Image (cartoon, grey):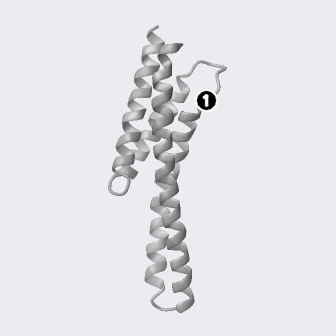
Amino acid sequence: MENNNNLKSMYFVLFILLLIETVLFILFGNIMAVATFIIALILRSKLPKGTRTPSGIKLAIISTVLHFLGNFFSIFIVILAELSEYSDGLLIFSLICFLIFFIYLIATFVLLIVSCVKIYSEYKAIDNY
């Protein structure tokens, strides 16, 4: 029973961190992505041996990694934008990369929302075990 309460509290912490990361997506969400990733890995390690990793934890790990990697992609976009002042071909490539980055951000945001919902549903299902 104690392990069940511990697992439930870890799920709750992960849900709150995912919620904060989603709300602060553009400003400070990347800082929260690291904390969320670490908590998700700790929660995954606390699961009983021989059980599969639930889809909510997998989605949380994937979405936080993608959110954090967006930092490096945005740095690449800024460098391309600065270099595009010197070449028209590079300007077109920079605009295409910016469009891909915008789609990437939307997909990451949707993944974060879906992982919040999945983690919350798994949190609520712990009582049924």
Identify the image quadrant of the C terminus: top right
SS for callout 1: loop
Amino acid residing under circle 1: Thr
Residue 86 vertical placement versus 107 (above, below): below
Side of 25 relative to 121 (left or right)? left
Residue 16: x %, y % from top left: 36, 35
The image position of residue 85, as x and y in percent, is 45, 89
Q: Residues within 10 Å of mark 1 (few under 14, many from 20)?
A: few
Q: Nearer the viewer, residue 129 or 1?
A: 129
Residue drawn where x is 45% and y is 60% of the image: 71
Residue at 38% in and 30% down = 13
Task: List the single residue furthest toward the top.
Answer: 1
**Residue receiving disc 1:** 53
Residue furthest out toward the right: 50
Residue 50: x %, y % from top left: 67, 20
Percent across and percent down for residue 96 are 55, 76
Determine which quarter of the picture holds residue 55: top right
Please tell me whether residue 113 is drawn above or below residue 98 in the rendered image.
Answer: above
Q: Nearer the viewer, residue 78 or 27?
A: 27
Answer with left or right where residue 68 lies relative to residue 93: left
**Count of marks, rendered view:** 1
